[in-house]
Image (spheres, rainbow, N blue to C red):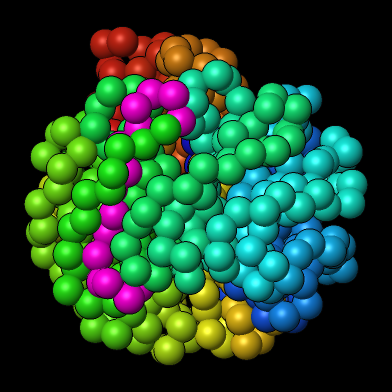
Amino acid sequence: MKKSITLAALLTLFLATSGEPADPLFSEPNNYDVGDGSDAVFAADLNGDGDADLAVANRNSDNVSILLNNGNGTFLLAAVSYAVGNNPTSVFASDFDGDGDNDLAVANQFSSDVSILKNNGDGTFVDAVNYAAGGSVVSISASDLDGDGDTDLAAANYYSFNVSILKNNGDGMFPSVLTYAAGNGPFSVSSSNLDGDDDVDLAVANEFSGDVSILKNNGDGTFIAAGNYAIGNVALAVCASDLDGDGDADLAVTEGWFNNVSILRNDGNGTFTASLSYPVGSIPRSVCASDLDGDGDADLVVANRGSDNVSVLLNNGDATFADAEHFVVGYSPLCVLASDLDGDGDADLAVANFDSDNVSVLFNLTIVPCCETPGDVNDDGAVNALDFQSLRDYLHKDGAEEPPCFEQADVNGDGELNGQDMSCLARELFSPNNACDFVECP
């Protein structure tokens, strides 16, 4: 989606051109109350209106809260909560029963099971059905593990030192479970194609053994014995994403007591080479990857439980990262995700804050250049008289629509939309012998 100019965006542009660093700029947090001890948050369209809603696992109140998006990244103030198992610590949304809407899976640590809440299609949910997993389920990931077209589950079991695989019958029921050994204290599980064979493998961060377990898929939802990669410290969270732009999934891992995030680069076949570590905040508890600054590569954002903030690390494009920039959120943030919450085409942040019992939403205010064709004011792919009319109407008629891409309408490149742009466009269109040179796209 193309992004129109805003006051916040103009401020970002001013800073970028006045010698200040052009780092991704996030808004102050907007906080939304949920249940007691918010431990995890996940974004998905839950009510079918096309925007991203939030589901929050609340550890102390044994429920999951639903925050429905108003369409602009603000949320209904009264969260609706649904009972799950005992001590929920992770939540994932996917269409488990194949009816076209997003259901919920919740990992419950103390009851050692997974709760499935099926969506009624409108963002309300039926009562949870619980399926036994392993000992102390603390993290869950959903993907098609056996290649049959439906969404299965992988669960990290903290005290039994293994990972459980719950295969979907196709109707959102998970009657059987298989377990595979991981490291000591599995704390986080991520699913991705790690070895390039088109099926979904698993990466597991192990707190006690300070390593990451890689379980490669045989293609049918069974897995070979784990290979472990040392991190050197408490491994609390793992995220899989192509960080160096070579087409395979690398890993970012938070080290809980060393206060940094480590990069494991994929050799292309699901084996990994340790790269660099980068300082973040205190007790980094969660990490996710997303293109935060609109340059086409995957950046990192980390939730820091001990310093009550999130750290943003911009990717240089080769899996090396700039120094972290920190943004204040609520108390004891345990989980962060990046998703386009306000529909403007860039990745915003949602953070679950354990001690303040709320979710912080931070809007991304980074300017993502939308320019492709200078002079294409109405953004229809051509420069013609309709563009002149659109610009004239915007400048002189009350209520006229703003041009969808500021840079394409600002044909003289002076940072303003005014009569000079209209004159330049008119010369280009109607006086070819006196044409105006359009400023090239940035």
129 left or right, relative to 285: right
Label total for image: 0
Is 98 placed above or below 94 here? above
x then y, percent, for residue 156: 48, 58
Q: Magenta segment: does it hold 216?
A: yes
Q: Which residues are magenta?
A: 207-221
Q: Residue 312 falls in which quadrant of the image?
A: bottom left
Q: If the image is split into quadrants, where does the C terminus sit?
A: top left
Q: Is residue 123 above or below residue 313?
A: above
- In percent of the image, x 75 and y 27: which residue is there? 171
Q: From the viewer's perspective, tell me whether residue 402 is left or right of residue 409.
A: right
Magenta portion: prevailing SS class:
loop
Question: Which residue sits at x=35%, y=32%?
Answer: 217
Which residue shows up at 42% across the image and 33% down it? 222
Task: From the top left corner, tell me how far across and down residue 368 is, in percent.
Answer: 39, 46
Depth check: give the residue in front, 97 or 323. 97
Where on the picture, by quarter, is residue 48?
A: top right
